[in-house]
Image (tube, coloured by chain):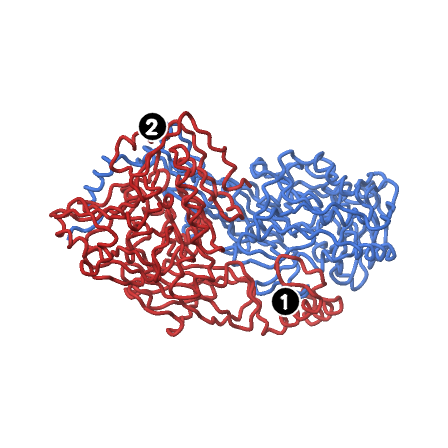
Chain colours: A red, B blue
Amino acid sequence: MAPAEPNAIPFQALGEVPVFAEELEGWKGYIEWEKYPEKKKQVEELMKKYDFPDPPEFQLVPLPDTNPILTGERFKQYHYACGLQHIVDISWKYVLKEKAADMIHVLQFPYNGEPKRENLLKSEISSNADFFVRNHGGVPEIDADSFFLDITGLVNEPKRLTLADLQNEALFPRQTNVVSLQCSGTRRIEQIHEYPGDGDELINAPWGEGAIGTAKWIGVSLKKVIKYCGGLKDGAGHLELFGADTYFKKGKVYNYAVSVPWRKVKVNEVLLAWEMNGESLPRIHGFPLRAVVFGYIGARSTKWLYEIRAIRDPSSAPVQRKEYLYFTPQVGKQNAMYSNGFSIQDMPVSSAILTPRDMQHIIHDGKITMRGWAYSGGGHWPIRVEVSGDGGSIWYEVPFDKMTTKYYYAWRLWEIDLPVDAEGWLEFCVRTWDNALNTQPTFVRSAWNWDLHVTSSCHRIKIYSVNRSRPATAARLKLMEEKGIPFAPITKPLEIDLESDEQYEAAMEARKGRDPTE
Amino acid sequence: MAPAEPNAIPFQALGEVPVFAEELEGWKGYIEWEKYPEKKKQVEELMKKYDFPDPPEFQLVPLPDTNPILTGERFKQYHYACGLQHIVDISWKYVLKEKAADMIHVLQFPYNGEPKRENLLKSEISSNADFFVRNHGGVPEIDADSFFLDITGLVNEPKRLTLADLQNEALFPRQTNVVSLQCSGTRRIEQIHEYPGDGDELINAPWGEGAIGTAKWIGVSLKKVIKYCGGLKDGAGHLELFGADTYFKKGKVYNYAVSVPWRKVKVNEVLLAWEMNGESLPRIHGFPLRAVVFGYIGARSTKWLYEIRAIRDPSSAPVQRKEYLYFTPQVGKQNAMYSNGFSIQDMPVSSAILTPRDMQHIIHDGKITMRGWAYSGGGHWPIRVEVSGDGGSIWYEVPFDKMTTKYYYAWRLWEIDLPVDAEGWLEFCVRTWDNALNTQPTFVRSAWNWDLHVTSSCHRIKIYSVNRSRPATAARLKLMEEKGIPFAPITKPLEIDLESDEQYEAAMEARKGRDPTE
């Protein structure tokens, strides 16, 4: 099979590579595009000259067994063509500096990475080093002292606020929240394995169960900031959030931008945060300031947030209008529009088994311990987690004291000792009920969608169960141990005879032979 | 991921490589083992000295995208160690000489190959070049003039018969039958994809739907031959069939041997055949003489048949006693015995879709043509074939005039124009009913078994349906054609905008925006 990310032709500049100056002193890696239509036009013309490498095929062929799994050649070359190689390099520098050494680098650039599953189970609060990262561009390096946030648009008193202003408790009450952020791509690999879907020029990363994490965030409520700016003008319905990262889409360049409805802000569910788990935000997570939008898809929690603009309708920026759309199963390459997908904001109830892992064999004595997470967005919380050892026919409830703290906006970790009598390949799955009685679709197919978002179906894993409390199994395991034969890999043929001729003949006599006698 | 067949360490002889003489003049490649316990012992001691390469892992990792898919290093080296390299070489020579150029070489040695699916659809009789091959050893080159068949054991008058004797119509009436042969491994790849199973030292080949074929065989009924030998002695219940190929199992060497019950012979369902589709048997299919056991697993249709021994019980040879066993789902590495699997003889009702192929996209106008085969063993025949376009909820019957001839012992090819309205990924499946009202298990899991035999569950394929009779789809296809954008691969992102800003805004106005207004 072809490698998923082919050895792309190395970048070769066609003509002169432009130099786009950084916008501000102390804001390295921030190129302002939105205020300069002529610069955007220049990039658009430039991009047309290039024949960039295709995004790698990784849906119709197996993923490469490498780390980084995918490298993002196409997006790297977009940056090279625009003279922005330093943005690519700085992004990786912060991966190495700020993230755990055992991260799974799903995509090297823009950086997308998820933690080792066991690390997520250590605490209901995920460590900063283990928190997943889903970036859409490079990491701007902004000095806290130089930083400011502009409040613009349909607001009565537009203002520029420094970080010191925001942190001034005389101006704004400080707010602390435990909030889970989840990428809508979490568990996408299950959808890919079921049916390949849309490939995006910014790779629809093949995430596993780790594109979710929970932190304690400190900041100010965006509601208070808007109030401080004299409130919204009539007709303002949404707040557009701009990040200082550079983003490309279909031959055009942008600063990252999305929007959240004012309704969401009004209930104090949008935090402007500078602290994550008792530390300043890591650079890779948005230092010095990011949005944290509770219960929403992670994509709205804009990092390196430098402008908030009050607008009438949802943002027309590509990330809001053209991406993170959820289509119905009959919609795809032949008929997908931006308007016939719905825009993912609130996240549905979902859960995952983190250990054991898919395709493991487990030698046990009648019980298998399973651990994982359960989450529901939109201000809902998991009230019940159920696990099945038979593919979803019989469900066992996770005991309430084996679930971590209830929060309005965060996941709960859970653990169960599941009774397992059966042997061989079993299908384990988990489902969660939230406080609104929502539960999860049963199969991946039940909720498969063209852009492969929001894999909220019951998470299923295959486990080969070996029940040592059964005499025949105990005898075989003992024999294998005596002979020094490991059980793994299960596909390795046993070199010993399964049964002696004498045993076989005795067994056949007891069964009265293989065929009827009359 | 690791390649399935690693670059095995090249064979290095340890000490002197023995020379085992061919048994008979004019019987090249036939080493007689069963009559020489001392030679068997010599091989057993020799094999212990070697550390042969492990069979390749291809169940837990993807199959390599090569042809041959697997090469069989371990089995090759068994032969090299015993001074039998020529057997390996001759086997491949006959593949190149006798088989179609487009065969899928599932395993190079011992040769296992299946035809291109389209080739199977050409006629209800499969051509010799396109007939699947599942060999357990090399190809002996036996001269027709030197050939003889010994009838031995519990028979009243043991005899040696030449090919001329068998073809002497004064001695034996000639019998012609259209018979399908099917490997019990047919469609094994579906079981592997669902759950990995037992790895065998002689690779459990990852077959697709092509390990079945139908030919017109000419020969004599084994019943007549036994009668000519004065009939069986009291207590004889089975006939052991010996092939001139060399077979290895767990460090021991054998001639290929299996058995069939006398009951089966008595009803003229065991043919000793020398002609296949109007030609002498190809060498790779058993020239000059093979058994054809109607309605049974192919493994009993012994090639290069040189001895038939009447015995009391089923053969204790490893192919009969230790292989081709069908286990229940809770049986596996931890508890499988030879006696707790049942021995596969009669083959159950089964079918497959040959075209289209899994994972294709199909642009159509409301109907998709599907073709395939349907078969039932044990003297049953397919009376109805049904196809579903929705994973097995609604079934369409294949019209009776779109099915080929009914035979007692052969498959039927079928074709249907299936109405398909829906778009996107659909799951098509087929099931067959035989004249005893047997039909197929619904899912692979329904009949998964540790040795991965007899994949008789409904054959399922995934098809991406693009229905051009729908206006939105027709418009998109027209646009893509105008812009020269191919539809494949479906995962390649569309470089054009899915919708203009004006179209989007009009659509949003019609939908009255994304959110409620109050």
Task: Please rate how many residues cluster around mark 1, counting C-alpha atoms within 10 Å: few if below 14, some from 14 to 19, many from 20.
Answer: many
Q: What residue did someone put label 1 on?
A: B335
Asked whether the viewer can see residue B214, the reply is no
Same chain for mark 2 and mark 1? The answer is no
Q: Considering the numbered disc 1 on the image, is that residue within a helix, a strand or a loop? A: loop
**What label does residue B243 carry, if any?**
none
Which chain hosts label 2?
A
Q: Pick whichever, A135 or B143, lies toward us.
A: A135
Location of residue A436 with respect to B135 vertically, above or below:
below
Question: Tag 1, which chain?
Answer: B
**In the image shown, does A267 or B186 lie closer to the viewer?**
A267
Q: Viewed as shown, does residue B263 lie left or right of B361?
A: right
Type of amino acid under label 1: Asn
Q: Is residue B12 left or right of residue A235?
A: right
Percent from the top left, x then y, of residue B36? 87, 55
For the residue carrying disc 2, how many other residues have a C-alpha within 10 Å: few (<14), some (14-19), or many (20+)?
A: few
Most distant residue in the top direction: A15
Which label belongs to residue A45?
Answer: 2
Please provide percent x and percent y for residue A80.
Answer: 42, 35
Residue B482 in view in this figure: yes
Which x, y percent locates residue B50?
78, 54
- Count of picture labels: 2
What's the residue at 62%, 59% (across, down)? B326
Q: CA distance from mark 2 to mark 1?
A: 68 Å
